[in-house]
Image (cartoon, rainbow, N blue to C red):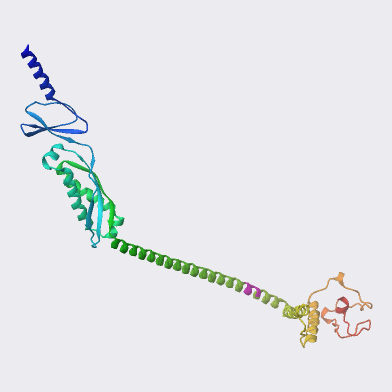
């Protein structure tokens, strides 16, 4: 009974020591007689008690290194302080256990060296607007080193960049100078654009004025040709009539003006009127008068021989007395 009980207890203890249940977030490293044998993933496993031993329990959850400031100097000798955030997780537990004693401290030292090297390659201004490239280079360099330790760098970037007061003042002066430069460039571009628009407007105006001159010249040429054709057909009577009418209209405007106190009459007004009368007489002789508008004279002229030519009939003079005995009245005045 005692032996049986002792055997039962031994079996229970052996089974309990041989069975291992690994959580989902861990990996267990098993050693056999002090030497690495295997890595137990999550789930149920059986080992040989007394021969196999769970030497290390490694967490495979993603972790973040504590943030800490890193002093560095840029390519243009500007002292700055940066803070990097690094996330990693274990991919090979036995490498983490047997290759490095303190993985977090090792990663911190590696991040410090890579950050200082990358910042030393760029200028201070480039660091302000191009942090992404520094973060990418940092992540690539960490990935190369981390593979030997059995870890994976999931994310690494610069979260903060600080600098001393002197650097702040220099940066502010540089920002002000850059703003002033942009303002000067903007004003210069505006003046250039205004000059271009003004030149375009002047060119457009000149083109339109040239076109208007061409149109006026064509109109004057057409008018000149029309007048020339009229002169060739009817002589200079239309020109003389137009000149006399222009003189009369000008005198009428001068006399009708309210602000005019003195009326200027040309010295040759009598000659002008006489010329107008003579011109009308000559012009009326060129235009035949309809029979319905003629007024019969009191004493009709004796009939003439129809066979006689029309050019043989004498033309009455305007100054000769008519058949009624009136001096100075010609037939054209009675008809008028």
Q: Does 171 appear above or below 56?
A: below
Q: Where is residue 103 shown, x and y percent of the image?
A: 16, 43
Judged from this view, the residue extending furthest toward the top is 1
Instruction: State the residue in front, 249 or 157.
Output: 157
At 12% from the left and 24% from the top, the residue drawn is 17
**Could you tell whether 209 is left or right of 185 in the image?**
right
Q: Is 222 contained in the magenta span? A: yes
Q: Quadrant of the C terminus?
A: bottom right
| Residue 198 position in % (x across, y down) | 50, 69
Q: Which residues are magenta?
A: 219-223
- The residue lying furthest to the front in this view is 2
Hey, which quadrant is residue 261 in on the image? bottom right
Q: How many marks?
A: 0
Q: Residue 191 appears at what percent x and percent y?
A: 45, 68
The residue at the far bottom in this view is: 267
Q: Position of residue 300 (x, y in %)?
A: 93, 77
* Residue 210 horizontal side relative to residue 36, left or right: right
**Per the image, is 233 magenta?**
no
Q: Is residue 236 left or right of residue 90?
A: right
Q: Looking at the picture, does residue 267 appear above or below residue 65?
A: below
| Occupied quadrant, residue 100 | top left
Vertical relation: 23 (above or below) 212: above
Our reading of the magenta stretch's main secondary structure is: helix
Report the front residue among 312 and 322. Answer: 322
Pick the quarter of the image with the N terminus.
top left
Residue 173 vs 88, above or below: the answer is: below
Q: Quadrant of residue 249?
A: bottom right
């Amino acid at each position: 009974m005692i032996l049986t009980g002792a055997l039962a207890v031994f079996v229970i203890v052996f089974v309990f020591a041989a069975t291992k249940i690994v959580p989902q977030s861990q990996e267990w490293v098993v050693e056999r007689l002090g030497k690495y044998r295997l890595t137990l993933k999550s789930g149920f496993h059986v080992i040989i008690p007394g021969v196999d031993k769970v030497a290390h329990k490694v967490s495979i959850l993603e972790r973040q290194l504590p943030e800490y400031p890193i002093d560095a100097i840029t390519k243009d000798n500007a002292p700055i302080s940066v803070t990097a955030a690094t996330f990693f997780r274990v991919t090979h537990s036995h490498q983490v256990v047997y290759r490095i004693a303190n993985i977090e401290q090792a990663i911190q030292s590696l991040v410090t060296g890579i950050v200082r090297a990358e910042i030393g390659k760029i200028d201070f201004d480039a660091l302000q607007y191009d942090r992404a490239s520094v973060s990418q280079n940092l992540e690539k360099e960490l990935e190369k080193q981390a593979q030997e330790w059995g870890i994976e760098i999931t994310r690494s970037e610069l979260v903060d960049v600080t600098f001393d007061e002197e650097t702040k003042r220099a940066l502010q002066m540089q920002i002000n100078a850059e703003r002033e430069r942009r303002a000067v460039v903007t004003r210069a571009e505006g003046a250039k654009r205004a000059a271009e628009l003004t030149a375009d407007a002047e060119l457009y105006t000149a083109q339109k004025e040239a076109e208007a001159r061409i149109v006026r010249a064509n109109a004057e040429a057409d008018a000149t040709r029309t007048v020339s054709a009229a002169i060739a057909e009817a002589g200079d009577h239309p020109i003389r009539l137009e000149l006399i009418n222009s003189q009369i209209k000008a005198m009428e405007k001068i006399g009708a003006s309210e602000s005019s106190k003195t009326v200027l009459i040309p010295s040759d007004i009598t000659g002008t009127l006489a010329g107008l009368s003579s011109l009308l007489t000559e012009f009326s002789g060129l235009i035949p008068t309809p029979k319905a508008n003629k007024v019969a004279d009191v004493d009709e002229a004796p009939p003439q021989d129809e066979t006689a030519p029309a050019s043989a009939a004498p033309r009455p003079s305007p100054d000769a007395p008519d058949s009624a005995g009136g001096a100075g009245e010609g037939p054209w005045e009675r008809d008028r």
